Image (cartoon, grey):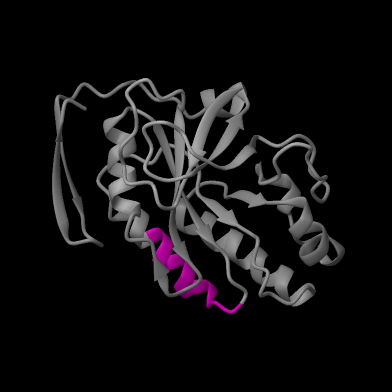
Amino acid sequence: MKRGFDSRWWNGIMPADSPYLFGYCKATEGDGFTSQQFGLQMLALQNYGKLKGAFHFHRQASNTTIAVKRFHDVVSALDVPVELPPVCDFEDTRATPGLKLVDHMWAHVLEIEQKFGQACMIYSAGWWWDRWAKPYVQDRHKFYERMLWEADPDPPTPIGEWGEPDVKQVRLDIMVPGFNAAVDENEATDLWFNSYLLPTPDKTEVEVKYKTAEATIKLTGV
């Protein structure tokens, strides 16, 4: 298993001997929120040589087209590679359980896949999925054919009809020496992690323009 983390409030600094090999950063939520930490976090992961990915938090009240376009635009504004698949986080406790919700969720998945050109990974927990979504999933909703990031620390709660997750959360809100904020710790299967490994780029300097924050940051020694 390979260890990784996610943390919304992380400031981009970690110890050089950090055991984490990958990180996911929250990019957007609903159709009106963009994380202002996202650009800094992605640049930092690049500088530390970690695999990186972005996730979107789904809201039932959002407009699918607007929400996914914002997610894609924010990720595309980065001039660093995003090696890991896009993730949609389904944990909206404000949502109304039912078929209408599940249709909205599935529309998000399809729109993300169309925009990003790759399969969308599902992030959810048994306590949420099995109440809000599972009873209303129809044959046309192919969630269980997608990769799963399980948000249940051990002991895990079964989630829908998935088997073993590709990534699972193992500890929540832990303070790790060298980090400014609590992180959620995750473990990925070797097969999942290795499938996203890329050759190390032959670069000594990379200039990154993060358009959303209207900032230009130069990193050396990448």
114 left or right, relative to 151: left
Q: Residue at x 30, y 37 (%)?
A: 13
Find residue 77 and report its image quarter: bottom left
Residue 158 drawn above or below residue 1: below
97 left or right, relative to 55: right
Q: Is residue 45 magenta?
A: no
On the image, the x and y values in percent for residue 99 come to 79, 73
Residue 24 drawn above or below residue 133: above
Magenta residues, dominant SS class: helix
Find residue 174 and report its image quarter: top right
Find residue 139 and report its image quarter: bottom right
Query: Residues in magenta?
Result: 61-72
137 left or right, relative to 119: right
On the image, the x and y values in percent for residue 53 come to 44, 43
Q: Residue at x 15, y 46 (%)?
A: 217
Q: Is residue 62 magenta?
A: yes
